[in-house]
Amino acid sequence: MTTTEPEYARRINRSPLAYVRHTGPYFGDERLFQRLFGELYRWAGPRDLVVRGVTEEIIIYHDEPETVAREKLCASCCIPVPADTETAGQVGLMTLAAGRYAQARFRLDATQFGAAWNWVFGEWLPQSGYQPDDRLCYERYQHHEPTEELDGTTGRAFVVDICVPVKPLPRCRVVVSNARCASPLAACARSGSMTLF
């Protein structure tokens, strides 16, 4: 597994996404995502919504795996589409909320996605000065051939951006009388005066 340090991007007026949604277990099931994107491309292709090697693929995760039963987990496989796109049947339309996201690029095989997500939340995020925001996490894939066969036994590598909505940790305004301290947080604790903003 290889990665780059997360970057921040403000997402404003994100283009709508056409999606096919799955409810149930999905961890490590590469063929499930192949099938879902296959359904999406079969709908999008005749509508000229796919550019081979350019179309961006997005997988949105709607639940926290630690708190939701596996059979109730929900994920959406998406591609960007024009705002006036009409959908029907298994294909729906949604838009990601604007805001700030931490984006870390990984090169992974099919068995390493869990470790990558754990690194973002368990190692990077706690020391980043940010906290998770109340928006949806997602994975972003670029420059994939829609018809490319996915087979977890081939050792195929995926280049994926893991995107986590974040917001700054609350800061404290220090009011200290006759005290000197190197740490603002320690000063807050000693003075008993802290204002969040």
Image (cartoon, grey):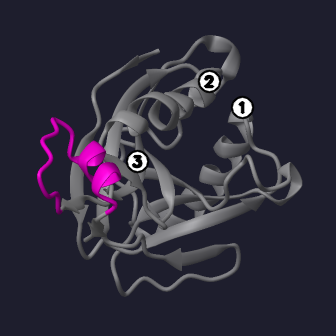
Q: Secondary structure at mark 2?
A: loop
Q: Does the segment drawn in magenta span residue 85? A: no
Comes first in the chain, label 1 or label 2: 1
Residue 144 appears in view: no
- Residue 173 placement (x, y as % from top left): 19, 63
- Residue 129 placement (x, y as % from top left): 29, 45
Say if mark 1 contacts mark 2, CB within 8 Å: yes
Q: Secondary structure at mark 3?
A: strand
Comes first in the chain, label 2 or label 3: 2
Residue 140 appears in view: yes
Q: CA distance from mark 2 to mark 3?
A: 18 Å
Say if mark 3 contacts mark 1, CB within 8 Å: no
75 or 69, nearer to the observer: 69
Quadrant that contains the C terminus = bottom left
Q: Residues within 10 Å of mark 3 (few under 14, many from 20)?
A: many
Q: Would residue 136 appear left or right of 37 to someone viewing this image?
A: left
Residue type, mark 3 in image? Cys
Q: Residue furthest front?
A: 178
**Residue that mark 3 sits on:** 163
Q: Would residue 133 appear left or right of 177 to someone viewing this image?
A: right
Residue type, mark 2 in image? Ala
Q: Which of the labelled discs sits on residue 110, or is there none? A: 2
184 or 41, nearer to the observer: 184
Comes first in the chain, label 3 or label 1: 1
**Residue that mark 1 sits on:** 28
Q: Would residue 136 appear left or right of 165 to someone viewing this image?
A: right
